[in-house]
Amino acid sequence: MDHTSLDIFRVVAAELSVTRAAKRLGRVQSNVTTRIQQLEEELGVALFRRDGNRLTLSTEGERFLGYANRMLALADEARQVLSPQAPSGTLRIGSMESTAAARLPGPLAALHVQYPDVQFRISTAPSRQLIEQVRSGLLDCAFAALPPCGEMASAADLDAAGLHGEPVFREEILLVLPPGHAAVRQGADIAVRSLAAFAQGCSYRVLAEEWLGQDTSPLDIQEVGSYHSMLACVAAGGCVSLVPRSVLELLREPPEFRTQVVAKVDTWLVHRNGYETAAFKALREALTPFVSKQLAAKRKSS
C-alpha cells in the first residue's frame, strides 16, 4: 500500500470518475484503473460500487477514505518536519464561515506571496465538526469558537483531547432583528420565534438558543448554509439570527436591521499537540499581530 496508490484512490473518490481522475492526475485511464484494482485486491474489499460507468464509494471505501487522508497527511507532515528550511507542502485549514470571509483573506494572501510553495487548502464547517476533524487528523488546524458548554469548552478540554488552542480573534456577536422590530433587552422580548442558523455543531447557534430561551414559546430553527441566507431570512421578517459584526461589515449596503450585542466570543486556532510544520509556524507568525491585539484587549477589560 504505497502513497501513490492512496493518492490515486483519494482523487477517484473525489471525482467519482476514472476519466476525470486520470485527467486531474495526468495519468492514462488504464493506469488509474489498475492501481485501484490492485489496492482493492490488497485490502480484500471493493472500495467502489460500479454501475456501468457510474462510480460510488462503497461502505468500506468511505471508511478507508478517512484512513487514506490521514496517512497521506501524516506522510506530508513528516516530509515538512524533516525539511524545515522553508515552508512547503500542504496545510489543511478548517474555518468557520464567518472567519473565512472576514478574517483570513488578508493573512492568507500575504502568506501566499511570501511562501508560494505552500498549498493552503481551506474548508468550512461548524465549530464542533472542525474540532473533531483536527482531532481525527483530517485537518491540520482550524479556526473555531469553543461551545459555551459541553465538550471542548475550554483550553483544558482541548488538552485532554490531545489538542492545543489559542484565541486569535475576538468577535462581537450581534442579535440581528428584522427592520422595524421593537427594541429588546432579553430573549422574551423578541416577537419572531424563528431562528436562522447553521446546522448542529455551530457554537453561535448554541449561544443563540441559550439567549433566546426555550421557556417562553417554542423556537423554530431554520437551518441555512450561509450568512447571506441568514440575513435574507431576517430581512424578509421571518427570522432572527446571531451574526458576527465583522460579517455585517462586509455588506456594501446592509439593510436597516435592528441589532443588539449579545456576547463577545473568541475564535481559537486549534491544532494537535506537537504539530509544528514550517507551514503551520508561518501561519501562526502571520496571526501574531491579531494574537497580540487579543491579549491587550483582555488585559484592558480585566
Image (cartoon, rainbow, N blue to C red):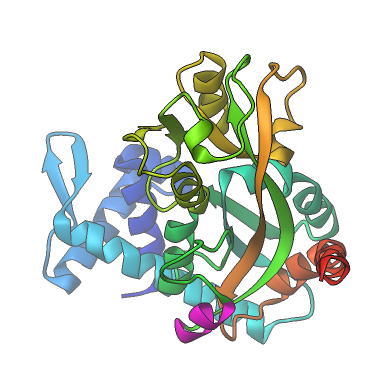
Q: Quadrant of residue 63?
A: bottom left
Image check: 297 left or right of 249? right
Report the residue at 38% width, 38% height from top: 20
Q: Nearer the viewer, residue 280 or 18?
A: 280
Q: Quadrant of residue 54?
A: top left
Q: Is residue 225 visible?
A: no
**Main SS of residues in magenta:** helix
On the image, the x and y values in percent for residue 184 come to 60, 32
Q: Nearer the viewer, residue 87 or 8?
A: 87
Q: Magenta segment: does it hold 157?
A: yes
On the image, the x and y values in percent for residue 83 come to 70, 82
Q: Is residue 96 above or below residue 238?
A: below
Q: Is residue 272 above or below residue 117?
A: below
On the image, the x and y values in percent for residue 161 come to 45, 81
On the image, the x and y values in percent for residue 55 come to 21, 41
Looking at the rendering, the stretch of residues picked out in magenta corresponds to 155-161
Report the residue at 37% width, 48% height from top: 200
Report the residue at 32% width, 52% height from top: 32
Q: Magenta segment: does it hold 133?
A: no
Q: Is residue 149 above or below residue 259?
A: below
Report the residue at 16% width, 53% height from top: 58
Image check: 55 left or right of 187? left
Q: Quadrant of residue 61?
A: bottom left
Q: Is residue 230 above or below residue 122?
A: above
Image quadrant containing the C terminus: bottom right
Q: Is residue 87 visible?
A: yes
Image quadrant containing the N terminus: bottom left
Q: How many numbered circles does the render carry?
A: 0
